[in-house]
Image (cartoon, rainbow, N blue to C red):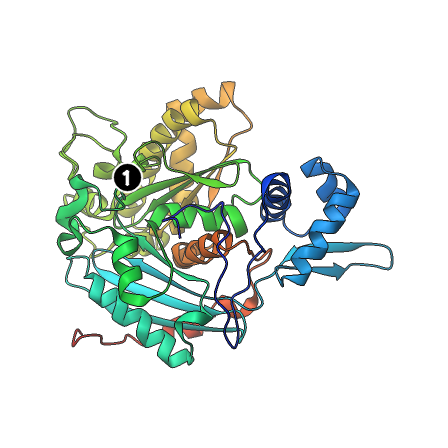
């Protein structure tokens, strides 16, 4: 499986419950199938007439492709009324594991589309980004609990809280201090060898961007920028339905746009990066001088909601810094939608008022009034959902609407068990 690409089909070996994929095709027909799949991912459930218009294929060609997709278990036709039906992507047989590897914690979720079950696990870390062996153990614990074997899976997706070099699949050199156990390891290949299951490795913000484009704030946008603001600041670009990585795989790293050349030193080696103004650590440091210190970004957001003026001020200023960065990025990339996710976005108007108030955003509005800036919709699960979207796209599948069972309730989140793997607490 190509590491992180989302525009090819990979057939699977059979099993008691195989992960079905689009049958291999060649030449023009393969391109036509891909155009129909991309249209369904971009626009959601659609009539065959609408698919023909969007893909510029003949109604007969679309009808034949839809029949093939239905036979392969990739799409279904849903009656809407007595005269119209909609084609929708489904993943009725696939099982996917999505893993999020952060510096301070590791999360994983198994999505069994055959059994309509989601299983979650998480492991706290000590700020060193874990190890490949820990990922393998976490995935194996979930597959064992689900009673599934390697052949039941469409694949595993791993979202790293670090940029990955496109040529090597390794963590970028300037981010390795945060992930010492991953140095010089091709992430996808290393994990694939350990699991015996196809693996996609990707930056966590890129996966979150793909999820928000597929099912969230960016749905229907041809060009979409997602910005994740939490412990760190990451960004992902989706252009024409695909993650845009650039020549070296590091495209979308909006956290390292330089806002102030003489500003604080960033861990990447530059000064005045966006990260040095709106990351969790930066916001907490800015708050300390006020005598209204907080222990986490979420506590700052809670304090602002309760009316703490210092908390409200630092969040508003974070929004202004984001506005400056968005304006610079938008002038270059011109995305239709910019969505803000992560803990910072939970502050709502406190941050978004700051974004809109920046001088640079005002100037941008004058020339590009159609650009929309909004909160992301998928919350803390965005990276995990993006892993699902990436694996399904890789295997020629998709889901037009996230099923209810894939989205845990608030109560389920609160009761989620923290599992101990390899003796870690």
Residue 148: % across, % down: 42, 77
Tell me: 175 left or right of 349.
Answer: left
Q: Quadrant of the C terminus?
A: bottom left
Above or below, comparing residue 176 to residue 131 in the picture: above
Q: Which residue is mark 1?
A: 167
**Which residue is the extreme one toward the front?**
26
Asked whether residue 415 is in view, the answer is no
Tell me: 329 left or right of 313.
Answer: right
Asked whether residue 155 is in view, the answer is yes
Above or below, comparing residue 410 to residue 264 in the picture: below
Residue 338: % across, % down: 46, 37
Taking depth in this image into account, of 224 and 6 the one nearest to the observer is 6
Taking depth in this image into account, of 210 and 126 the one nearest to the observer is 210
**Which residue is the extreme one toward the right?**
82
Please name the residue shown 55% across and 69% down the image.
93
Provide the secondary structure element on which disc 1 rests: loop
Q: How many marks?
A: 1
Name the quadrant containing residue 222: top right
Taking depth in this image into account, of 267 and 187 the one nearest to the observer is 187
Name the quadrant containing residue 255: top left
Residue 314: % across, % down: 27, 41
Above or below, comparing residue 97 to residue 254 in the picture: below
Please name the residue shown 47% across and 27% down the image.
334
Residue 304: % across, % down: 33, 50
Tell me: 416 left or right of 84.
Answer: left
Above or below, comparing residue 152 to residue 98 in the picture: below
Mark 1 packing: few (<14 Cα in 10 Å), some, or many (20+)?
few
């Amino acid at each position: 499986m190509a590491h992180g690409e989302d525009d090819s089909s990979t057939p699977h070996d059979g099993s008691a419950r195989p992960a079905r994929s689009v049958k291999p095709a060649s030449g023009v027909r393969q391109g036509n199938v891909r155009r129909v799949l991309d249209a369904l991912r971009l626009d959601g459930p659609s009539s065959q007439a609408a698919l023909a218009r969007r893909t510029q294929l003949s109604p007969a060609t679309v009808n034949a492709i839809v029949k093939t997709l239905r036979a392969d278990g990739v799409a279904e036709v849903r009656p809407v009324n007595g005269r119209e039906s909609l084609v929708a992507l489904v993943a009725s047989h696939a099982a996917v594991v999505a893993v999020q590897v952060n510096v301070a914690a590791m999360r994983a979720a198994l999505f069994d589309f055959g059994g309509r079950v989601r299983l979650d696990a998480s492991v706290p870390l000590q700020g060193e980004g874990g190890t490949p062996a820990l990922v393998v153990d976490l995935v194996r614990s979930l597959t064992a609990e689900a009673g599934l074997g390697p052949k039941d899976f469409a694949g595993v997706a791993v979202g790293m809280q670090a940029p990955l070099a496109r040529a090597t699949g390794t963590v970028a050199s300037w981010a390795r201090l945060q992930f010492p156990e991953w140095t010089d390891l091709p992430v996808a290949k290393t994990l694939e060898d350990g699991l015996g299951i196809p693996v996609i490795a990707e930056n966590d913000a890129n996966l979150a961007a793909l999820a928000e484009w597929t099912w969230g704030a960016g749905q229907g946008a041809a060009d979409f920028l997602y910005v994740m603001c939490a412990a760190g600041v990451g960004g992902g670009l989706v252009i024409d339905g695909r993650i845009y990585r650039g020549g070296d795989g590091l495209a979308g790293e909006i956290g390292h746009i330089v806002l102030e050349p003489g500003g604080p030193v960033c861990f990447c080696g530059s000064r005045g990066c966006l990260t040095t103004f709106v990351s969790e650590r930066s916001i907490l440091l800015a708050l300390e001088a006020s005598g209204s210190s907080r222990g986490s970004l979420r506590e700052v957001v809670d304090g602002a909601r309760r009316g703490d003026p210092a908390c409200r001020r630092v969040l508003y200023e974070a929004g202004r810094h984001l506005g400056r960065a968005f304006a610079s990025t938008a002038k270059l990339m011109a995305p239709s939608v910019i969505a803000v996710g992560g803990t910072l976005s939970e502050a709502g108007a406190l941050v978004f008022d700051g974004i809109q108030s920046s001088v640079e955003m005002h100037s941008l509005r004058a020339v590009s009034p159609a650009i929309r800036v909004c909160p992301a919709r998928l919350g803390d699960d965005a990276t995990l959902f993006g892993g699902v979207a990436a694996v399904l796209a890789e295997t020629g599948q998709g889901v037009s609407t996230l099923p209810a069972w894939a989205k845990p309730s608030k109560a389920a989140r609160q009761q989620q068990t923290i599992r101990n793997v390899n003796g870690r607490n």
